[in-house]
Image: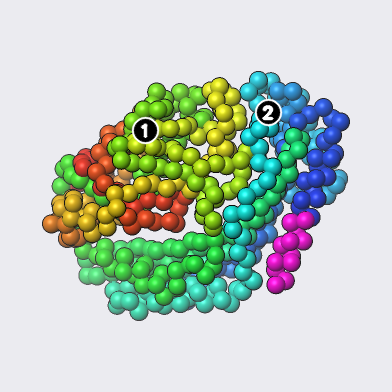
Amino acid sequence: MELIKDIETEELSLLNTVQKTLELSKNKNISIEVYIKKTIGISVNIRNSIVENVEFNSDGALFITVYNKFSKGTVSSKDFSMHGIKNMLEMAINISKYTSSDFFSGLPDRKNLCFNALELDLFHPWEWNIENAIKFSVLSEQEAFKFDNRIVNSEGSFFNGHMTINIFGNSLGMLQKYKSTRYSSYTCMIAKDQYSMQRDFDYSISRKIDNLLKPEILGQNSAKRAVSRLGSKKIATMKSPIIFLSSISYMFFSHLISAISGNHVYQKSTFLINDLKNKIFPDWLDIIENPHIKQGLGSKPFDNEGVSTNIKYIIRNGILQTWLLNSYNARKLQLDSTGNCGGIYNWLVSHSNISFSELLKNMNKGILITELMGQGVDIINGNYSRGAVGFWIEQGKISYPIHGITISGNLRSMWDNIVSISNDIDIRNNIQCGSVLLSEIQVSGN
């Protein structure tokens, strides 16, 4: 395949660029880290079978960070020429002369670095074919229109495919690389009856193009969801059990990321500041971070400063096991880096080994949340308030769609009120979780 040959040639060229940069930095009495990220891909956007946009992108950047004793200088550029690299290096050194000295800054401890990157099966190239990408998106939209005559319009159908080369090196002798691919598709449709119009969507994402949802299924799903929201009603203000559907339940756990991130911890700006090794979830709940899942969307052999990633418990038996630390905030806290510079990896949330239908029956009466809106979460005190839409559940079955509600509470009590999690795991995000039943929450309606 010509594309694979081109990528391999590009990878060798970028590796050589990092090596040259590291060589140029020798004898300058500095510590240095060099990172190159190059992304190549296509994006197709169609609406009502008309191609609205086709893009091919080939974007790359070189990042140089130098540590001059405890002063830091960082620069980036798209100029990979020898002249450009020399200028970048001198600029980074000059910047470091004007920045404040910070005892906690510097390269990661050598013992934490990744000198042998794991092969995680992340790279599955596809020979770019614009025609096939357009056909994929058009077919998905056409199937959506066929699904029900109440589907009256489209908000668009998209296809994206990208390949990324990552190369990282530093003056402690680390020089590692890995490649990855990511494909995604998305279709959003509009349904209408005599009373209202509603929109909804479905999407698919994978490291391998063959693992994307078939376009026919994608279109049918988006149409079915849009139609299901017709006849939506408002409800009275109440306290009610709720279920976060698995497609959005990752959002419920994503606030934990901010609450235990090193920056918030050392700044004491998180409501969990005193909760390390304390119980914050039900005792049956575990969250494991596994960066090494083959083809995982959140898999990486090393973090953004070259520290090896590792499998670890975030929550075990409901107890918070660790903060999420890079080298800087780890030093601030007199701890070790957890390899989370740049964020989290694959979080696997345990479940109660029951089906989604059983979860509905267990709730019996309440609200199924299918979409959340707004960003009303305060990590300092844990207060939570977000707009939502979904369905009213009666006798364990979907009764009718609802809208115009706000759910509110405090994350600490919300996490404690988790009753069970079903086994309908959604794997399309870094946080992989089933649908989540909460015993009670404040719901503001009419």
Against 170, is 422 above or below? below
Residues rendered magenta in the picture: 1-12
Please give the name of the residue rendered at 45% of the width and 46% of the height, measured from the top-left corner.
347
Mark closer to the chain start, 2 or 1: 2
Q: Looking at the picture, how far across and down is residue 431, in whole percent?
A: 43, 48
The answer to whether residue 369 of the structure is visible from this angle is no
Please give the name of the residue rendered at 45% of the width and 63% of the height, measured from the top-left corner.
204
Seen as rendered, the residue at the extreme left is 395
**Badge count:** 2
Q: Looking at the picture, how far across and down is residue 62, in whole percent?
A: 72, 46
Please rate how many residues cluster around mark 1, counting C-alpha atoms within 10 Å: few if below 14, some from 14 to 19, many from 20: many
* Residue on which disc 2 sits: 106
Tell me the quadrant of the picture where the N terminus can be found.
bottom right
* Amino acid type at image mark 2: Gly
* Amino acid type at image mark 1: Ile
> Could you tell me what secondary structure mostly forms the magenta stretch?
helix
- Tell me the SS state at disc 1: strand
Location of residue 246 (image quadrant): bottom left
Against 214, is 427 above or below? above
**Distance between the alpha carbons at the discs numbered 2 and 1:** 32 Å
- Tell me the SS state at disc 2: loop
Please give the name of the residue rendered at 74% of the width and 61% of the height, measured from the top-left corner.
8
Asked if residue 354 lies in the magenta stretch, the reply is no
Please give the name of the residue rendered at 29% of the width and 53% of the height, measured from the top-left corner.
353
* Residue on which disc 1 sits: 319
The answer to whether residue 328 of the structure is visible from this angle is yes
Between 418 and 372, the one lying in front of the other is 418
